[in-house]
Image: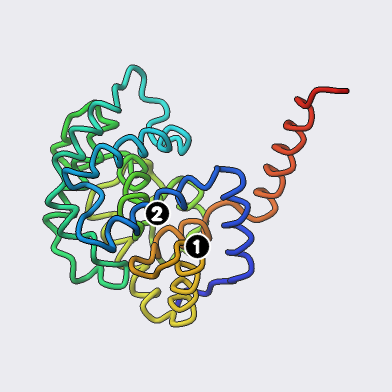
C-alpha cells in the first residue's frame, strides 16, 4: 500500500502550480476536454496543437537538457506522428490497469519518445534517457512518473528504481508494475486522486495517477516554499520605485 499524506500533496501541488505556471494542469484540462468527446489529442485534428503545447513546456521541465545541437522539436514532431496508433491503444488505460496494457504499443511509445534526445536514432538495446520518455508521457498519458533524479531518490527502496539516467524499457515497466501493485491496494489514495481530478479538471474521465505520485515524490515542501520565497523576492526586486 502507498502511504500518501494528502495535506502534504495538496501543498506540493499548489506550490508547483504557482512556481511552474500550471503547465500540467492547463495541458490536462485540454486533454480531458478533447478525449471526453470523440477524438484524442494526437489525432489528425489535434496533434499539431498537442505538439505546440509540448514544445512550450518540455524545455521548462529540462527534458532535453545537455543535448548540444539537438533539434528536438523536429524529431518530437516526427515521433508524435509515429505514435498515433500506439497512443490511441493505451490512452484509456490507467496506472491501475497497467498489467492489462499490451506491451507492443508501450514499447513503440518508449522508443519514439526516447529517440528524441538520442538525435533521432533508435537505440538497438532500447536504452534511453528516462526523462526524455517519461516527461512527455506524463503530459500525454498521465499514468507514469517522470522518474527524474529527485523521483528516483525519493521513491521507496522497495520499488528498486534504477538510479541511472538511462533506462531500458523493461526497467521502466518493472518499476511501474511494482508501484502499481502497491497503488492498487491504496483505496484511500485512489479515491483521493479521483476527487482531486474532479476538483482540478472538472472530471474524473481520466485521472492522472502517475502525475499526482510524481508530485508527491518530488521536492520536499520546504524546498518548494524556499523556491517560492525566492521567486517572490526576485519579483519584488524588479518592481519600479515610485
| Drawn side of residue 21 relative to residue 66, left or right | right
Residue at (16% x, 41% y) in the render = 125
Quarter assignment of residue 44: top left
Quarter assignment of residue 82: top left
| Drawn side of residue 119 relative to residue 12, left or right | left
Q: Would you place residue 155 above or below residue 239 in this image?
A: below
- Mark number, residue 28: 2
Q: Quadrant of the N terminus?
A: bottom left
Secondary element at image label 2: helix
Locate residue 32, reporting x and y percent: 34, 59
Q: Quadrant of the C terminus?
A: top right
Locate residue 221, reporting x and y percent: 66, 56
Label whose residue precedes the other's in the sequence (2 or 1): 2
- Mark number, residue 200: 1
| Drawn side of residue 103 relative to residue 200, left or right | left
CB under 8 Å between callouts 2 and 1? yes
How would you rate the neighbour count of disc 1 (Cα within 10 Å): few for under 14, some for 14-19, many for 20 or more? few
Q: Would you place residue 199 above or below residue 169 in this image?
A: below
Residue at (24% x, 44% y) in the render = 46
Locate residue 54, reporting x and y percent: 35, 38
| Drawn side of residue 206 relative to residue 222, left or right | left
Amino acid at each position: 500500500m502507498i502511504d500518501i499524506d494528502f495535506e502534504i500533496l495538496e501543498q506540493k501541488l499548489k506550490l508547483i502550480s504557482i512556481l511552474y505556471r500550471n503547465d500540467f494542469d492547463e495541458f490536462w484540462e485540454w486533454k480531458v476536454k478533447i478525449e471526453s468527446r470523440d477524438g484524442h489529442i494526437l489525432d489528425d485534428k489535434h496533434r499539431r496543437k498537442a505538439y505546440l503545447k509540448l514544445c512550450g513546456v518540455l524545455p521548462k521541465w529540462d527534458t532535453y537538457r545537455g543535448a548540444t545541437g539537438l533539434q528536438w522539436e523536429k524529431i518530437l514532431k516526427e515521433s508524435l506522428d509515429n505514435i498515433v496508433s500506439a497512443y490511441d491503444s493505451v490512452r484509456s488505460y490507467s496506472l491501475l490497469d497497467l498489467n492489462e496494457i499490451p506491451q507492443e504499443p508501450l514499447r513503440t511509445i518508449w522508443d519514439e519518445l526516447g529517440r528524441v534526445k538520442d538525435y533521432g536514432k533508435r537505440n538497438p538495446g532500447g536504452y534511453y534517457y528516462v526523462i526524455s520518455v517519461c516527461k512527455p508521457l506524463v503530459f500525454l498519458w498521465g499514468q507514469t512518473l517522470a522518474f527524474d533524479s529527485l523521483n528516483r531518490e525519493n521513491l521507496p527502496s522497495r520499488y528498486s528504481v534504477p538510479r541511472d539516467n538511462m533506462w531500458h524499457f523493461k526497467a521502466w515497466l518493472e518499476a511501474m508494475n511494482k508501484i502499481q501493485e502497491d497503488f492498487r491496494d491504496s483505496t484511500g489514495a485512489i479515491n483521493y486522486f479521483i476527487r482531486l481530478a474532479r476538483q482540478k479538471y472538472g472530471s474524473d474521465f481520466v485521472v492522472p495517477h502517475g502525475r499526482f505520485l510524481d508530485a508527491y515524490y518530488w521536492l520536499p515542501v520546504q524546498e518548494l516554499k524556499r523556491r517560492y520565497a525566492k521567486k517572490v523576492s526576485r519579483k519584488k526586486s524588479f518592481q519600479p520605485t515610485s
